[in-house]
């Protein structure tokens, strides 16, 4: 009997032993500046230092500094003050950020290069000093050395188009439905249709704007439609759906405009996008003529027998002047043409549905400002890692005249099914690549996308990081 | 093919005598008592139905922990397993698990979508099983809806021969080549206790834990942080917990037992998609949105049987079953291995009240018996919109909540014309809440010839009720139009079987049993999703297709001294007529034939208390037409071929210390089959789909390859 119980006992032990194990890993804290450069605008500026997790104990950070054409006490001062060529910044227990104050004592003259670079040299608690261990504080407007941004596209229905200027870190969000036509400011007389709302335009044979037109189901951008009815997806201004505006009025035909669709009114299922699931934006007809160096636009509802007219003027500081046919006025959309590099939006791209290319609405798309001179190309991490990539690695031959070089390439899907056999929502930023962006001023940045969804998995929440290449 | 059939028939008749059709055999078959489809427990020989039995001994030799492990070796059944979730379903004669009914102690087992149908075989634990009885063919009269290709009844153990029976088992298995004590392989622990309080009362309690750590294959597990599609598992890890208890009382002819079963399962889904956690200015970390599928199933069964007014025999079962499937979504941080944002919801649940009962022995006559039976099913189902394409016109998910009821009555008579000849007519009428009322009928004949030859003829009818997808699918938007159909009628089936059995005992102690069966089955009004309008495309579920099957099978068994050899073979011919409705296309309904073979050999080395067993099954090539879109963009039918494969298991079992300690070592899938090749001539719908007459070949995952197991069992029986 005893032998039996020993056997039973050994079974019990085996059973307990066959449980799976889990082990926790404790990580040391990390500390870094929140960005790598900063342009002074106010007199006093707090400079923030971040901890990866709340501090385990009170302590202090020691910073060193390097001055370029400025001197402590004359051009600037800090709080805590510099002593023995160091700043010691104390912090409390259980804090996530700490800052010191930079006070500008003397303005710089425009064009002068004046800055102070602060570097974290040590910390009293167990902590790693991360990559952003330095910050360059600029007295004048200087191209950003890099940061992390989260363009406010507005969630899964992506109501906004967001224009981003990397060198200033400035983002401009504009509702996608705020405009309908864009009038080119260059020497050509060209008109684009809103490429963010599934819009399309079809030439009629008529030159009479007051002639009644009909809705045309073949113009719907939903995987059918025709590429001749949308603007060139690459961004070539000479290949717009609306023909070049002729100086001969009789050559300028009436166009039927399918105004596309609004962003969805309800949020789609998590992981899906609703950029074009809202109600139709209706139908219009337009006829566009020249008016000296400007444009004269005649427009009306398709069934109308009368029309309205508006003059749209060219403005050379911008790529386009934008017009809202619904609000009947010129509207501000893009920043000045040298002041944005990339934009986040849904976009009427083309795709193959088996029988040639057709217009197709892409959500979570990134366009570069090809008309303003911002160009991009993609680098796979198999060629270079993001961290190791420098200006010397930039291949200028890879910049092309296509506004879609980031496009939808930054995001991807990993296919698969879950345990119910349902397809897995596979939307994610691709970590196997990053992009090189050359802005209109010639600054070259590397850009890596870190997310397309928020913590809840909803699309239309992109984030990216960038750093200047030197 | 013709040559094959001829050879096959020759092979059958060369045996001269006819065999016992008991595809996986056991020694004690001559005295075997069966209950499935019987008026009362009786010897397998007297049964009018051709009942196949899988004995406890067979289950032991296969070291089978669940039903999938054991049915892999059954002649007419194919076990299809889903690589993603590791679920296994039954397929018989080319019809899926919706046509085959699985019962536990004569009570259909609740599953995701039905009662007894669509059962995940890996969820049926075999720890407390006494034997498994299978009847092939349409059994609508005794077993109601969906018993189209056959039924499988698991008879659990009740009571025992000793005052105390204690047993504990530990089983360690590799998953393919993968094994480690914690993170890889399959680890099973179980324990059972049986106790007879006195000659009337008994109790059995058992528990089982089965942890399968997933099949990695080329994947990298849950803590892999690269976004290249390799995170996670090829087959998902899962853990199953089973508990059961039986309390019983018996005195003279009166018996009552209450049985409780609990089944819990936790399947872990690790998303291949790895997300970056942007911690700027700190280095990125990674997280994934993972899921956990949790199933809980409770089974209560109260059964009583005895005599009424001294003669009348009754047998009544009342059962309540509940199954809930929950989905827990959470975010898994790969660097810290922490779960956050856990959110758990029930996405599917089913509550069933079921009762069945019979009254028999109305006449005090040895030759004529008559049985009246009833069956009541009341199912309450809840399906979250994520389970199927259940949407409204605004593309929002619609949850489905439905109650299905049926009240059935049936009667069966067994008329012994003389000692040798029995006739068994039967009729069922079913009052349905959701469909038209249904009926089923059956007729069985049995004749016992001299010299051990038994002949049986049976005719049966049954029906399959439409499932939730077929009834309630709704997915209509600008690009899609796919609709279920609430007006569907149940599919109807008819089966015919003629079988011969013969058992011979020789003076030398040798036993030969032979069995030959010929079956014909047809299913009409089969439901399929078809094009009902071409432009624009509208799809709808309708009763449209037809299926016909005939099968000839034989099983031979030889027992001599320590040898036990079984050999089975079958040829099955299947014809499917597919109708594409608005496409105006109907497929060729010619019969495609396939050949199957199964065999088991065991040898008992009595001196060493050691039993060696080898199981082998061959599945021949299977062909069928499938609907598809050709390279010209037109709908059509394309030949699909499933390549042949073989399955082989082997084990060695040795007992020590007067059978108290039992060690089984063995291997499953010895031939290391991992993929099943399916070749299709066109119909892929794109330009590559056989545009130039070339076939496309796809691999279906069949298993994780050769695996090994070691099972240690300790039995302690005392009074």
Image (tube, grey):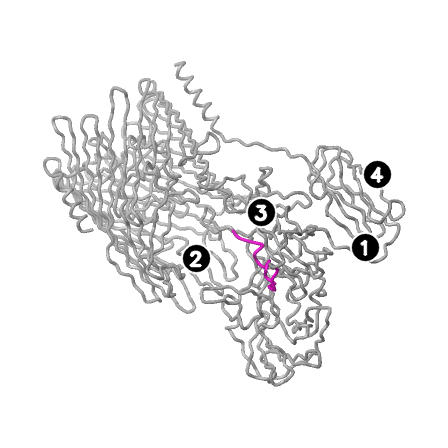
Q: Residues within 10 Å of mark 3 (few under 14, many from 20)?
A: many
Residue B376, image x, y percentages = 35, 46
Circles 2 and 4 on the same subunit: no
Is residue A117 shown in magenta? Answer: no
Could you tell me what secondary structure mostly forms the magenta stretch? loop
First in sequence, mark 4 or 1: give its number.
Answer: 4
C-alpha gap between disc 1 and disc 3: 38 Å
C-alpha gap between disc 2 and disc 4: 74 Å
**Magenta segment, which residues?**
A399-413
> In the drawing, does residue A103 fall left or right of residue A291?
right
C-alpha gap between disc 4 and disc 3: 42 Å
Residue A284, image x, y percentages = 60, 76
> In the drawing, does residue B112 fall left or right of residue B556?
right
Any part of residue B174 in sight: yes
Residue for badge 2: B473
From the image, which quarter does the N terminus of chain A lie in? top left
Q: Residues within 10 Å of mark 1 (few under 14, many from 20)?
A: some
Q: Nearer the viewer, residue B126 or B62?
A: B62
Q: Quadrant of residue B224?
A: top right
First in sequence, mark 2 or 3: give its number.
Answer: 3
Residue for badge 1: A140
Q: In the image, which is nearer the foreground, mark 4 or mark 3?
A: 4
Q: Quadrant of residue B143?
A: top left
Q: Which mark is residue A85?
A: 4
Is residue A408 shown in magenta? Answer: yes
């Amino acid at each position: 009997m005893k032998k039996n119980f020993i056997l039973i006992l050994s079974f019990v032990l085996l059973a307990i032993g066959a449980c799976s194990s889990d082990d926790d890993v404790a990580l040391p804290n990390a500390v870094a500046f929140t960005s790598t450069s900063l342009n002074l605008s106010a007199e006093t500026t707090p400079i923030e230092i971040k901890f990866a997790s709340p501090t385990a104990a009170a302590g202090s950070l020691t910073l060193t500094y390097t001055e370029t054409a400025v001197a402590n006490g004359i051009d600037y001062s800090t709080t805590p003050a510099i002593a023995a060529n160091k700043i010691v910044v104390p912090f409390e227990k259980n804090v996530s950020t700490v800052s010191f104050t930079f006070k500008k004592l003397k303005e710089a003259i425009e064009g002068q290069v004046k800055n102070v670079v602060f570097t974290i040299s040590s910390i009293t608690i167990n902590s790693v000093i991360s990559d952003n261990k330095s910050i360059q504080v600029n007295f004048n407007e200087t191209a950003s050395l890099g940061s992390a941004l989260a363009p406010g596209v507005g969630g899964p229905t992506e109501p906004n188009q967001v224009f981003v200027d990397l060198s200033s870190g400035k983002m401009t969000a504009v509702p996608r439905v705020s405009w309908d036509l864009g009038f080119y400011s260059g020497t050509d007389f060209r008109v684009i249709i809103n490429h963010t709302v599934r819009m399309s335009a079809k030439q009629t044979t008529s030159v009479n704007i007051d002639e009644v037109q009909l809705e045309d189901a073949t113009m719907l951008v939903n995987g059918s439609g025709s590429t001749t009815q949308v603007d060139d997806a690459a961004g070539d201004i000479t290949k717009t759906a609306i023909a070049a505006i002729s100086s001969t009025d009789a050559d300028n035909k009436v166009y039927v405009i399918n105004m596309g669709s609004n962003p969805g009114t309800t949020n789609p299922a998590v992981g899906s996008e609703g950029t074009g699931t809202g109600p139709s934006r209706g139908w219009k007809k337009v006829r566009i003529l020249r008016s000296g160096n400007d444009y004269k636009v005649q427009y009306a509802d398709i069934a109308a027998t009368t029309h309205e007219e508006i003059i749209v003027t060219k403005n050379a500081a911008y790529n386009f002047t934008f017009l809202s046919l619904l609000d009947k006025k010129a509207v501000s959309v893009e920043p000045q043409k040298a002041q944005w590099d990339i934009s986040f939006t849904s976009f009427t791209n083309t795709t193959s549905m088996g029988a040639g290319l057709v217009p197709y609405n892409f959500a979570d798309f990134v366009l570069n400002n090809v008309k303003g001179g911002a160009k991009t190309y993609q680098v796979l991490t198999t060629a270079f890692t993001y961290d190791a990539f420098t200006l010397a690695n930039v291949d200028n031959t890879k910049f092309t005249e296509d506004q879609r070089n980031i496009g939808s390439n930054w995001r991807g899907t990993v296919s698969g099914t879950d345990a119910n056999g349902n397809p897995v929502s596979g939307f994610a930023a691709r970590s196997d690549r990053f992009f090189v962006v050359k802005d209109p001023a010639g600054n070259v940045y590397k850009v890596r996308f870190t997310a397309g969804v928020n913590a809840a998995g909803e699309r239309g929440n992109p984030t990216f990081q960038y750093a200047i290449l030197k | 093919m013709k040559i094959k059939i001829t050879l096959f028939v020759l092979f059958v008749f060369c045996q001269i005598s006819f065999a016992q059709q008991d595809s996986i055999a056991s020694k004690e078959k001559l005295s075997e008592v069966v209950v499935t489809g019987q008026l009362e427990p009786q010897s397998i020989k007297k049964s009018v139905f051709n009942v196949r039995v899988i004995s406890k001994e067979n289950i032991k030799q296969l070291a089978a922990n669940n039903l999938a492990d054991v049915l892999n070796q059954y002649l007419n059944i194919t076990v299809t397993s889903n690589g993603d979730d590791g679920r296994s379903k039954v397929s018989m004669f080319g019809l899926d698990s919706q046509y085959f009914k699985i019962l536990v102690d004569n009570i259909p087992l609740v599953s995701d979508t039905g009662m007894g149908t669509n059962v995940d075989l890996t969820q049926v634990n075999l720890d407390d099983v006494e034997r498994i009885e299978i009847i092939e063919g349409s059994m609508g009269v005794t077993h109601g809806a969906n018993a189209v290709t056959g039924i499988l009844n698991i008879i659990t153990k009740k009571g025992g021969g000793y005052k105390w029976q204690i047993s504990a088992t530990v089983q360690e298995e590799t998953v393919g080549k993968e094994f480690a004590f914690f993170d890889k392989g399959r680890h099973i622990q179980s324990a059972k206790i049986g106790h007879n309080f006195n000659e009337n009362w008994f109790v059995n309690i058992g528990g089982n834990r089965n942890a399968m750590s997933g099949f990695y294959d080329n994947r990298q597990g849950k803590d892999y942080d690269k976004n290249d599609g390799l995170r996670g598992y090829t087959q998902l890890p899962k853990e199953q917990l089973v508990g059961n208890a039986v309390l019983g009382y018996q005195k003279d002819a009166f018996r009552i037992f209450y049985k409780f079963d609990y089944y819990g399962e936790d399947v872990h889904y690790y998303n291949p998609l790895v997300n970056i956690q942007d911690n700027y200015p700190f280095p990125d970390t990674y997280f994934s949105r993972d899921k956990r599928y949790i199933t809980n199933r409770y089974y209560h069964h109260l059964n009583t049987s005895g005599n009424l007014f001294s003669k009348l025999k009754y047998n009544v079962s009342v059962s309540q079953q509940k199954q809930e499937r929950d989905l827990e979504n959470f975010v898994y941080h790969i660097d810290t291995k922490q779960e956050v944002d856990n959110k758990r919801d029930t996405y599917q649940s089913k509550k069933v009240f079921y009762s069945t009962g019979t009254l028999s022995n109305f006449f005090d006559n040895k030759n004529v018996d008559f049985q009246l039976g009833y069956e009541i099913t009341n199912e309450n189902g809840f399906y979250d919109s994520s389970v199927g394409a259940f949407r409204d016109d605004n593309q929002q998910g619609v949850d489905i909540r439905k109650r299905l009821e049926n009240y059935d009555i049936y009667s069966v008579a067994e008329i012994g014309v003389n000692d040798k000849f029995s006739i068994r007519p039967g009729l069922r009428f079913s009052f349905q809440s959701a469909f038209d009322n249904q009926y089923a009928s059956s007729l069985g004949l049995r004749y016992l010839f001299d010299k051990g030859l038994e002949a049986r003829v049976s005719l049966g009818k049954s029906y399959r009720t439409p499932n939730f997808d077929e009834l309630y699918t709704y997915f209509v938007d600008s690009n899609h139009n796919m609709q279920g159909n609430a007006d569907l009628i149940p599919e109807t089936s008819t089966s015919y079987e003629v079988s011969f059995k013969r058992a011979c005992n020789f003076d030398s102690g040798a036993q030969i049993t032979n069995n030959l069966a010929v079956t014909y089955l047809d299913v009409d009004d089969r439901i399929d999703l078809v094009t009902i309008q071409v432009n624009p495309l509208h799809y709808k579920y309708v009763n449209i297709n037809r299926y016909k099957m005939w099968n000839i099978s034989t099983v031979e068994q030889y027992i001599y001294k320590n040898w036990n050899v079984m050999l089975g073979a079958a040829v099955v011919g299947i014809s499917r007529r597919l109708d594409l409705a608005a496409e105006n296309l109907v497929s060729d309904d010619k019969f495609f034939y396939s050949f199957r073979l199964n065999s088991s050999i065991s040898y008992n080395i009595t001196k060493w208390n050691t039993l060696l067993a080898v199981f082998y099954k061959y599945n021949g090539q299977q062909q069928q037409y499938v609907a598809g879109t050709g390279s010209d963009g037109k709908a059509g039918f394309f030949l699909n071929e499933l390549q042949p494969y073989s399955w082989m298991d082997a084990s060695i079992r040795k007992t020590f210390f007067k059978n108290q300690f039992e060690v089984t070592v063995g291997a499953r899938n010895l031939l290391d089959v991992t993929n099943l090749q399916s070749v299709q001539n066109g119909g892929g719908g794109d330009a590559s789909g056989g545009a130039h007459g070339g076939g496309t070949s796809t691999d279906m995952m069949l298993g994780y390859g050769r695996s090994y197991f070691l099972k240690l069992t300790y039995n302690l029986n005392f009074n």
